[in-house]
Amino acid sequence: MANKTVRLLRVVVVALTAAGVLAAIGFWYFRAFSPDRQRYPVRGVDVSHHQGKIDWRRVAADDVAFAVIKATEGGDHVDDAFATNLSEARAAGLAVGAYHFFTFCRPGADQARNFLSVVPRDQPMLPPVVDIEFGGNCPRRPTPEELRTELNAFLELVEAQFGKPAIVYLIGEAVDLYETVIPARERWVRSLVLHPGNENWVYWQYHNRGHVDGIEGAVDLNVLQGTPARLIELTR
């Protein structure tokens, strides 16, 4: 009986050790994952006030070419770091753009006016981005037709002012409910440490716990679909 107990304990120890090793390998793979730089040479970040004070010159020196910065949310919220992040990232030489978190509890036109009230249009910018997701949103879930109506109202006003189509970021359960009613726009996809499986996107957010010099803590990491020339084209 004693020998059986010892053998069982050994099996348990080996199994736990193997599980620990696999977990460690998985952690370091996730932490270090980066898409093929020859295939996707243009790197970027998306940020908000949650990243705190950012040293954008250090960010730019760490192989980051563009930044998409949170500007607004809903009909009246403005990210209090937007203006500083935008001006400092631009001054550091990054291509810059702005995104709006689309809420389900305010009309799309109100949200568009909020976005346009704070995002400058007198300097080169990447296309505006509208972020549609359930996390952090209003508890009410509009029907697909309701979402299409309000999103179209937002896009009509924003795109008329920017003179270029917006980019849509649609993730999670919102994809299942709203994918079929989203207007035809280029997409920003989220696929953590896995290739999206297609090339039908303009940005790929591949990490949500990445690290970049100049930013304390974790930050979302992205690549552009295309070359530096494509980034310049988008910024015009």
Image: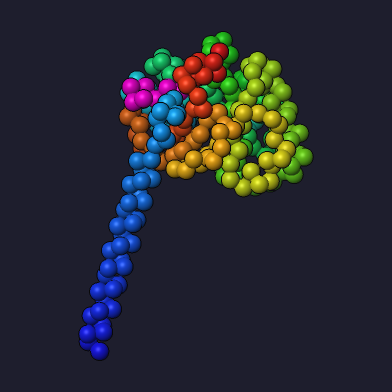
Residue at 33 percent of width and 22 percent of height: 61
Instruction: State the residue at coordinates (69%, 17%).
Output: 160
Q: Position of residue 141 (x, y in %)?
A: 69, 46
Residue 223: image x %, image y %?
Answer: 46, 30
Magenta region includes residue 74: no
Number of labels in the image equals: 0
60 left or right, relative to 205: left
> What is the x, y in percent for residue 49?
46, 31
Judge whether 12 appears above or below 175 on screen.
below
Work out whether residue 188 can be spotted. Answer: no
Looking at the image, the residue that sits furthest to the bottom is: 1
User: x and y percent of residue 33 in the render?
Assistant: 38, 40
Position of the N terminus by quadrant: bottom left
Q: Is residue 153 left or right of residue 100?
A: right
Is 196 located above or below residue 47 in the figure? below
Quarter of the figure with the C terminus: top right
At a point 35% along the width and 41% down the height, the residue shown is: 32
Q: Nearer the viewer, residue 40 or 163?
A: 40
- Check the image and name the residue furthest to the front: 38
Vertical side of 140 occupied by 120: above or below: above
Q: Residue at x 68, y 40 (%)?
A: 179
The answer to whether one can see residue 33 in this image is: yes
Write the start and end of the magenta stretch as one range.
Answer: 60-66
Which is nearer the eye, 201 or 87? 201
Q: How is the image coloured?
A: rainbow
